[in-house]
Amino acid sequence: MRQLTEAQRTQFRNQGYVVIPGVLTDDQIAAARRIVGEMLERQPPEGVGAHFLWPALDDGHPLLALYRAAGIAELAAQLLRPELELLEPDQAQVATTIPPWPHRPGGPHVDGITPGLEDGTPGTFTMLAGLWLTSHEELDRGNLYLWPGTHLRFGEYLADRGADALSRVDEMNPGPYPDIPLGDPIQATGAAGSVLFAHYLLAHNIGGHSGSADDVRRETLYYRLRTTTHRANWRAAVTDPLLEFRP
């Protein structure tokens, strides 16, 4: 099993994200792209830009089989405290960006609060895993924008106001995301087959694809990962953003 380095774990804790190269094999990439292609044939995008599908993952779904075969849970577990375990994801997000779409996000957002869960609480999770099926080596090719370190500042914001401030969208900037120092964004880069892990609270948003209509669309599979104890302890997890992660 691939072992994360101490530098990779430190980057995740301090910056809120890390890109692990070479996780998917060429065969896994090709098979996943065939699955995505078939899904998009059944639910075709309308024009250029960002397009999302949200397949539910039953035990026989090929995207859950890919998650297992690629060892995503085992990699993610190396970022977590040893006593914590991950639930298997019950949904994936198929994210595609079709050029030409010269878009630049005006600001970031946080997932799971517009809308929240049926009980009125936000749909928080532990971390995001993004499997890159196409190259992200060039900038402005549908790369995800990230604001490094904002997971820690967002945690301070919620520690000051209480975890339930996460649901008070009217107190936040558009996105939604709170009015905290963001710093400069970066675009996540790396080769096809890489996996991005990002903290739930990290500021992020989709970027544009400035290629031509003949260029390859950007394809990413996202899985939202929760520990088995996350839902019971979500308030503590968002006010202490390193609570679930290895020191």
Image (spheres, grey):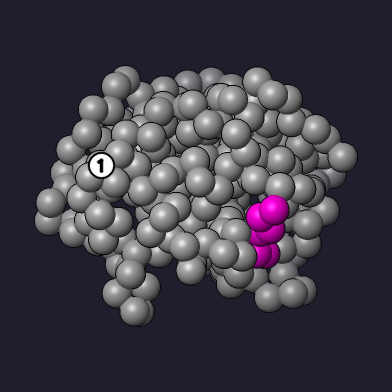
Q: Quadrant of the C terminus?
A: top right
User: Along the horizontal axis of the image, is 204 left or right of 132?
Assistant: left
Observer-nearest of 180 and 139 = 180
- Tell me residue 166's x, y (percent): 27, 56
- Tell me residue 235's x, y (percent): 38, 59
Q: Residue at x 35, y 24 (%)?
A: 185
User: Along the horizontal axis of the image, is 103 left or right of 191?
Assistant: left
- Tell me residue 30's x, y (percent): 77, 45
| Residue 66 visible in this rendered orientation of the protein | yes
Check the image and report above or below for 47 versus 103.
below
Residue on which disc 1 sits: 157
Asked which secondary structure carries label 1, the reply is: helix
Secondary structure character of the magenta stretch overall: loop
> Which image quadrant is residue 67 in?
bottom right
Residue 86 counted in the magenta span: yes
- Tell me residue 65's x, y (percent): 78, 62
Q: Residue at x 53, y 20 (%)?
A: 138
Amino acid at dot 1: Tyr
- Figure label count: 1
Residue 111 counted in the magenta span: no
Q: Report the span colored magenta.
A: 83-89
Q: Residue at x 38, y 35 (%)?
A: 152
Observer-nearest of 227 and 53 = 227
Q: Quadrant of the N terminus?
A: top right
Q: Residue at x 65, y 26 (%)?
A: 8
Observer-nearest of 245 and 102 = 245
Which residue, as the protein is rendered here, is positioned at the far left?
Answer: 170
